[in-house]
């Protein structure tokens, strides 16, 4: 039976306005193709690493060395954390492989991050079975997807199991870009919020908070 202990997810605006999340839960970050939603996985990872928690990072159809460079650019001493067995990368050849790795890792790592922004098309039966196992665990799983890059049924299953779904949207006005993150779904009543954010060479800057 999963513990009911609550914990901060690690995204500053989310933590303040939405509050804690539950162990044994799935959190979904869903962005458009220009949103840079995968970088929010590193905001979460940095917060957890500063608390001394172990982190597993699954890359669905991607390269771990590229991800190490992102982590370092955001001020995370990822190679030292790997050497200390506090951070672990797993490369997955497919979404099914990525989901299977969640099961392998969730007893050893309290936080499992999955970057499925290339394409997410996990088998619905495998996905449902795995997410039921997550719900009975003490791990928090955060999956980042691009809403138009994947199997709609697979993404729909993800969102149906999620404790929260946060959307990341990009709006263009000529050469000017505006990016917004907002809570789209929550299994329990929470404060609605939206925040502006920008992407810099050092990572993400959350600029302004506004009520919906």
Image: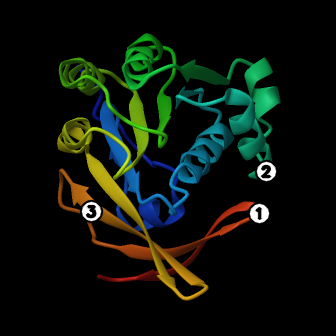
**68 sits left or right of 21 in the view:** right
Q: Residue at x 75, y 30 (%)?
A: 65
Rendered position, 103 above or below 20: above
Q: Which mark is residue 186?
A: none
Front-lying residue, 14 or 28: 28
Q: Residue at x 48, y 27 (%)?
A: 110
Whole-angstrom CA distance, mark 2 to mark 3, is 29 Å
Decide: few, some or many residues near mark 2? Use Cα within 10 Å; few <14, some 14-19, many ≥20.
few
Instruction: Identify the element where label 3 is drawn.
Output: strand
Query: Is tag 2's residue or tag 3's residue first in the polypeptide sequence?
Result: 2
Q: Which mark is residue 201?
A: 1
Contact between labelled residues 2 and 1, with CB atoms less than 8 Å apart: yes
**139 sits left or right of 198 in the view:** left
Instruction: Identify the element where label 2 is drawn.
Output: helix
Circle 3 residue: 184
Whole-angstrom CA distance, mark 1 to mark 2, is 8 Å
Circle 2 residue: 73
Front-lying residue, 79 or 68: 68
Query: Is tag 3's residue or tag 1's residue first in the polypeptide sequence?
Result: 3
**162 sits left or right of 35 in the view:** left
Rendered position, 68 above or below 149: above
Query: Is tag 1's residue or tag 2's residue first in the polypeptide sequence?
Result: 2
Q: Position of residue 89 (x, y in %)?
A: 63, 23
Q: Position of residue 161 (x, y in %)?
A: 20, 38
Q: Position of residue 6 (x, y in %)?
A: 36, 42
Rendered position, 65 above or below 177: above
Tell me the quarter of the image containing the N terminus: top left
Front-lying residue, 26 or 115: 115
């Amino acid at each position: 039976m999963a513990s009911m202990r609550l914990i901060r997810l690690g995204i500053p605006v989310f933590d303040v306005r939405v509050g804690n999340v539950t162990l044994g839960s799935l959190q979904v970050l869903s962005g458009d193709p220009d949103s840079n939603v995968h970088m929010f996985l590193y905001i979460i990872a940095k917060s957890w690493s500063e608390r001394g928690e172990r982190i597993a990072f699954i890359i669905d159809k991607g390269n771990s060395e590229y991800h190490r460079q992102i982590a370092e650019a955001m001020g995370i001493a990822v190679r030292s954390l790997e050497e200390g067995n506090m951070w672990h990368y797993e490369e997955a050849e497919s979404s099914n492989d990525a989901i299977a790795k969640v099961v392998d890792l969730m007893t050893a790592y309290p936080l499992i991050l999955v970057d499925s922004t290339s394409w997410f098309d996990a088998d619905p039966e495998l996905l449902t079975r795995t997410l039921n196992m997550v719900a009975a665990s003490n791990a928090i799983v955060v999956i980042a997807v691009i809403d138009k890059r994947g199997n709609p049924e697979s993404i729909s299953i993800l969102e149906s199991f999620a404790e929260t779904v946060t959307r990341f949207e990009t709006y263009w006005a000529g050469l000017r870009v505006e990016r917004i993150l907002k809570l789209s779904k929550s299994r329990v009543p929470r404060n609605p919020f939206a925040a502006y954010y920008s992407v810099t060479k050092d990572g993400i800057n959350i600029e302004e908070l506004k009520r919906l």
